[in-house]
Amino acid sequence: MADKSQSVIGIRDIASIEEMGAVEDLQREVWECADIDVVPRMMLHPAREVGGVLVGAFDGARLVGFAFGFVGLERGRVVLHSHMLAVKPEYRGHDLGFRLKVAQRGRALTEGVTRMTWTFDPLQSRNAHLNFAKLGVTSDDYRVDYYGEVSTSPLHAGAGTDRLWVTWQLDSPRVARRIGETEEGAGAAGLESARAELEAAQALVRVGGDGEPVTGWLAKGAGGGLVAVEIPGDVNEMMRRDVALARRWREATRGAFRVALEAGYVVEEFFRIERGGAYLLRWAGA
């Protein structure tokens, strides 16, 4: 088996049409989607030409992961929207997702872009840990069935395509600490105080004894406090064995996030806990 250590796998820009063809193939492999849902090289190439960022993880000459983002406007502000990130299953667990995002950040900052956005399924605990704990994103926007109720990918079967829209403030001290650019709070350190706050937060959804979602409520006029939304540890496995339960989790977390965000809370952290995972939301009002 090939050595998948960080020292062996290199991160670099994807520039050739041939390598963009490998990006097409990797999309099909990772998401098992039909061609209609594959972003083709005919889109990747011009997007890159006008400021988009397309970086790949290479084991020798073999593409094993990639991240693609295009330039856009969000409320009149230039952003890089990181639309896709994929890593071959056998190469996961080696920080390639983190390294690809950091590479995107470097390219964006070089061009004077200080804000990156993307979406992800809030029931996916692995992605939540990468985004919040390791990269330092925040979110104040929940999108219901962002890609429609279904897609050609079996990963979306049965539970819709809800997404959290996250913001990565590339030049912020928070991000610099999380990715290890500063000595203070390098990497995911500095989260312990927030973890202590999690214990005191009001749980809007928690994992019950049988793995079912147990819902709470947000008191009217609430503000200034902390709330938490728990999720199961592996929703993909849950989808395989009990689609109905996964749907219940979607409905419960959808309601909790929407109520909290509409009340002025912001999703700030994600923690791995014994029951699965937990988001920490802080009120952003004055």
Image: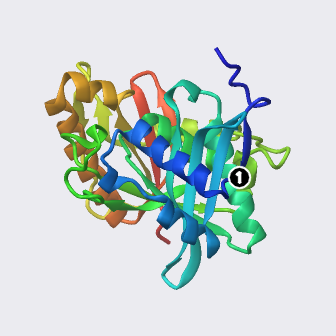
Residue 232 in the image: x percent, y percent?
34, 30
Q: Three-letter amino acid code at disc 1?
A: Ala
- Residue lying at 42% horizontally and 36% vertically, measured from the top left: 29
Residue 119 in the image: x percent, y percent?
44, 56
Question: Could you say which is closer to the camera, residue 134 or residue 4?
Answer: 4
Q: Helix or strand or loop: what does disc 1 sit on? A: helix
- Residue lying at 20% horizontally and 46% vertically, measured from the top left: 251
Image height of 161 relative to 124, above or below: below
- Give the farthest residue toward the bottom: 76
In the picture of the structure, the residue carrying the numbered disc 1 is 103
- Residue lying at 76% horizontally and 42% vertically, measured from the top left: 185
Is residue 268 visible in this depiction of the protein?
A: no
The quarter holding residue 252 reads top left
- Give the farthest residue toward the top: 1
Judging from the image, the colouring scheme is rainbow
Screen quadrant of the N terminus: top right
- Give the farthest residue toward the front: 18
Viewed as shown, does residue 54 lie left or right of 106? left
- Residue lying at 18% horizontally and 38% vertically, measured from the top left: 248
Is residue 236 visible in this depiction of the protein?
A: yes
Residue 196 in the image: x percent, y percent?
56, 36
Residue 197 in the image: x percent, y percent?
53, 41
Query: How many numbered circles does the render carry?
Result: 1
Label 1 crowd bin: few (<14), some (14–19), many (20+), radius 10 Å: some
- Give the farthest residue toward the right: 183
Image height of 165 relative to 183, above or below: below
